[in-house]
Amino acid sequence: MTATASRITIMAAAIVAFGARAHLAAPPRVTIDTGTLEGVVDSTTGILVFRGIPYAAPPVGTLRWRPPRPAARWAGIRPARELGHNCMQGQPYGDIDPYAAGVSEDCLHLNVWTSSLGSRAPGRPVMVWIHGGGFFAGFGGEERHNGARLAQKGAVVVTLNYRLGPLGFLAHPALAAESPQRTSGNYGLLDQIAALQWVRRNIAHFGGDPSRVTIFGESAGGMSVGSLIASPLAKDLFVRAILESGTGVGVGIASRTAAQAVGVQFAESLGVHGSGASAARRLRAISADTLLVVASRGGQSGAPRFWPVVDGWVLPHPVDSALLRGSANRVPVIAGSNRDEGDDWMGAPTRAFARLVSARGVPTYVQTTALAALRAGD
């Protein structure tokens, strides 16, 4: 080969390599029902990631304590490279930090991981993750819930934020009076349902099959999954469910009367009395920070419990009652408990605790018996 031919070959190879790098570096774009998104390619896995996608309008101002409204359309290309704001919430516990991405009432965003785009049939199965955190903390963008690994296995993965604490689950007669359904309190569950409706409308553009949606969650996320199984509003939005360390059966879901009593007490502690329209207006005028400070007084164990409520609309019946009555959504279910569940409340990983006491010669059966006998405050 002559020197000239060699130089031409090298130049051609360089052009091809440059073109390949340019192609690989091109950010992925997808058009959904509200506009075009530009995501990123995960540099480690090659998975396409779209973050901070609004699935509903910001629940602020007069939309606070109302069912989520449709997200607005946008012109041009919306960047979807960074997480959206996390929902307003109490102080973090354990190893989660919701404040890294900022917190705001404008928080109804979701994130998608997929190996490829397009609506070519058949689409891939979809897994929608609902985070835990006692309905008072947590967010869909936690790094430990990164969907890339499941996406590598052939799923399209969605994680989401939903309203928390008093902003997501305050039941109050003044709020019920202005509702067409005469209900209040399940705004966080309504957010989850709105996210599933978004998935139904849009997930095919990300390569997912809207008829093969599995919902799964842990702790309060597992209780959310149980609540969605029991909710007629979630009918046909998913076909499988996985409940991890929480089900909503027999614990945590209050009656309308009990939930509204908590809400009235909470409002009165803020100086808001009565159950008319003026009470609702005054509650909406209070800053989100103030709501959370008052809700958190006494620490998490002493705070009012803002959890799902049997409101007659979102949840016509408790989860266990809906299952026994046959009114629940009939889907295959996996239910269980995760290893080391409760680490955050123990103050140290349970396996480390077990190693510590075992090193001191404490038999396993004694450890188990002693832990079972502990009471809150011991």
Image: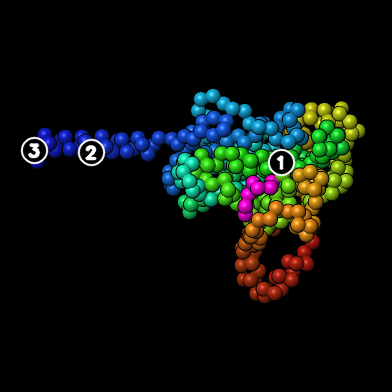
Say which residue appears at 58% left-offset and 48% top-offset: 211
Q: Is residue 235 magenta?
A: yes
Image coordinates of residue 346 in percent, x first then y, are 69, 58
Name the residue that disc number 1 marks: 190
Give the percent coordinates (x, y) of residue 113.
51, 44
Residue at the image position 51 percent from the left and 33 percent from the top: 31
Residue 371, position in %: x, y? 73, 66
Give the residues drawn in magenta, as a range. 234-240
Q: How many marks?
A: 3
Nearest the camera: 377 or 216? 216
User: Is residue 94 visible to the viewer in this orientation of the structure?
Assistant: no
Along the polypeptide, which appears first: circle 3 or circle 1? 3
Q: Which mark is residue 13?
A: 2
> Residue 29 in magenta?
no
| Local secondary structure at mark 3 | loop
Q: Amino acid at mark 3?
A: Thr
Give the amino acid type for the residue marked by disc 1 in the picture: Leu
Residue 34 lies, with reference to residue 333, above or below; the image says: above
x%, y% of residue 107? 65, 35
Indicate the secondary structure of the residue bearing disc 1: helix
